[in-house]
Image: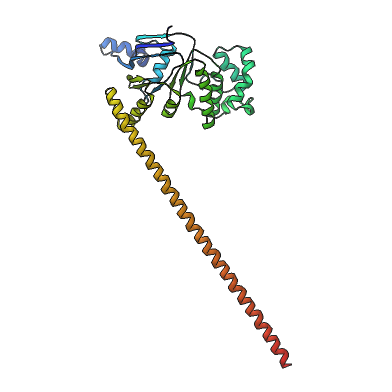
C-alpha cells in the first residue's frame, strides 16, 4: 500500500533580479550593455520525508527557514525545481485563514462565499451553517459587516469553515494559534478528531508545546536546509530550544542526544529557578501583607485608644460639671 505523502530530494529555487523586478526598459538596456544579471537562491534544498496514514508531522524552524514554501510545494501551489512529491488521496490546506473574505459583506454572506471557494455546495453550507457559526462563537454577529470584526473573530470564522473538511492529507500553517486560549483548545480538539479519523497531517507551528502534544514526527528546517527528521519529537524539540538560545546546530545523532540532555538539564534548572522565584515572590507578598496587617492593627489600636481617651475626657468633663452644679446648689 502506498504512503499518503512522499517527498524526495525536493528543492525550490527562486530567481531574483529578473525582468519582473526591473521592468522591460531597464532589462533591454542592461542586456545591450552586457550588464544583465540574475541571482538565484534556494528557499528549500534537498528536503526528504515520508508520512504514513495517521501520522502528524510538526515542522519547526525560525522565520525564513522555508516552512511555508515547503507547504506550498506539498499542496501543489508551487512546483519543485528539483525532486518529487507524491500525494495519494484528497488534500486540504489551511494556510492563510483570513484571505478570501469580502469586508463589505456580512458574516453570513462571507460564510457562504468562503464555503463556495473551498468547493462546498450550497446544500452542504445550508446544512452546516449553524454549526459553523456556533463553533466560531459568532451567533450575535451574523449580520455584521465582516470588516467590523476583530482579527480574532475573522480567524475563528475562517477556521470554523475550513475545518469542515475530512481529507486524506491535511496541511495546517499556524492555524491552531487563532483566537483566545479557550478557542485554541477547541481548535486542537477539532483537528485531533480529524487526525484520529485517519488523516495524515502536517502542522507548522512556533509552539513547541503544541508540537510535543500533537505530533508523532518532526521536521526541523533551517535556512532551507533539512536539519533533522524523525519520530524522536522530544529530543529534537530540546535541540531546537538549545539552538534558539545558543545558535548551535547538532552535527549528528550522537550530538543531538548530547544537546538534548544539556537542554533538558537547563529546562529543569529554569523550572527550579522559576519555582524559587514564585516562592520568594509569595514570601514577599506574605511579608507585605503581614506588614499591612500590623499597620492596620496598630492604627485600629491607636483609634481605640484615642476613642477611650476621648470618652474618659468627656466623662471627666461631665463629672466636673456635675460637681460645679452641686456646689452652686449648696451655696444657695
Residue furthest out toward the bottom: 331
- Horizontal side, residue 152 vs residue 139: left or right: left
Q: Nearer the viewer, residue 81 or 86?
A: 86
Q: Is residue 64 above or below residue 31?
A: below
Residue sticking out furthest to the left? 34
Front in this rendered view, residue 151 or 192: 192
Asked if residue 106 can be seen in this view, the reply is: no
Q: Residue at x 45, y 13 (%)?
A: 53
Where residue 284 appears, as percent x and y from the top left, is: 43, 52
Q: Residue 317: image x %, image y %?
A: 64, 79
Tell me what residue is drawn at x 37 percent, y 11 percent. Answer: 80
Q: Is residue 85 visible?
A: yes
Instruction: Answer with the quarter of the image where residue 253 lies.
Output: top left
Q: Residue at x 44, y 51 (%)?
A: 283
Exactly how many numbered labels are in the figure?
A: 0
Q: Is residue 21 left or right of residue 107?
A: left
Image quarter hosting the N terminus:
top left
Q: Nearer the viewer, residue 5 or 44?
A: 5
Q: Which residue is farthest right?
A: 332
Figure quadrant of residue 324:
bottom right
Percent x, y of residue 216: 42, 21
Amino acid at each position: 500500500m502506498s504512503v499518503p505523502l512522499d517527498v524526495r530530494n525536493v528543492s525550490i529555487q527562486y530567481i531574483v533580479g529578473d525582468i519582473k523586478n526591473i521592468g522591460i526598459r531597464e532589462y533591454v538596456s542592461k542586456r545591450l550593455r552586457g550588464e544583465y544579471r540574475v541571482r538565484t537562491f534556494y528557499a528549500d534544498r534537498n528536503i526528504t520525508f515520508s508520512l504514513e496514514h495517521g501520522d502528524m508531522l510538526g515542522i519547526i524552524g525560525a522565520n525564513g527557514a522555508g516552512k511555508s514554501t515547503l507547504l506550498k510545494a506539498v499542496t501543489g501551489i508551487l512546483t519543485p525545481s528539483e525532486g518529487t512529491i507524491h500525494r495519494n488521496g484528497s488534500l486540504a490546506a489551511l494556510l492563510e485563514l483570513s484571505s478570501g473574505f469580502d469586508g463589505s459583506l456580512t458574516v453570513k454572506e462571507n460564510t457562504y462565499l468562503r464555503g463556495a471557494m473551498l468547493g462546498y455546495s450550497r446544500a452542504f453550507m445550508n446544512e452546516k451553517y449553524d454549526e459553523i457559526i456556533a463553533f466560531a462563537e459568532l451567533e450575535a454577529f451574523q449580520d455584521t459587516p465582516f470588516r467590523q470584526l476583530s482579527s480574532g473573530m475573522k480567524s475563528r470564522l475562517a477556521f470554523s469553515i475550513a475545518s469542515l473538511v475530512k481529507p486524506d492529507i491535511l496541511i495546517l500553517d499556524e492555524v491552531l494559534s487563532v483566537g483566545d486560549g479557550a478557542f485554541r483548545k477547541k481548535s486542537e480538539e477539532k483537528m485531533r478528531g480529524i487526525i484520529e479519523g485517519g488523516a495524515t497531517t502536517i502542522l507548522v507551528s512556533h509552539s513547541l508545546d503544541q508540537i510535543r502534544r500533537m505530533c508523532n514526527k518532526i521536521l526541523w528546517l533551517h535556512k532551507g536546509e533539512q536539519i533533522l527528521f524523525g519520530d524522536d519529537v522530544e529530543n529534537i524539540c530540546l535541540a531546537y530550544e538549545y539552538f534558539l538560545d545558543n545558535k548551535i546546530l547538532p552535527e549528528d545523532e550522537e550530538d543531538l542526544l548530547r544537546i538534548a540532555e544539556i537542554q533538558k538539564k537547563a529546562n529543569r534548572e529554569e523550572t527550579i529557578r522559576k519555582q524559587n522565584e514564585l516562592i520568594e515572590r509569595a514570601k514577599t507578598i506574605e511579608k507585605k501583607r503581614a506588614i499591612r496587617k500590623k499597620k492596620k492593627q496598630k492604627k485600629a489600636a491607636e483609634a481605640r485608644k484615642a476613642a477611650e481617651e476621648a470618652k474618659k475626657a468627656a466623662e471627666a468633663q461631665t463629672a466636673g460639671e456635675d460637681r460645679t452644679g452641686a456646689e452652686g446648689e449648696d451655696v444657695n
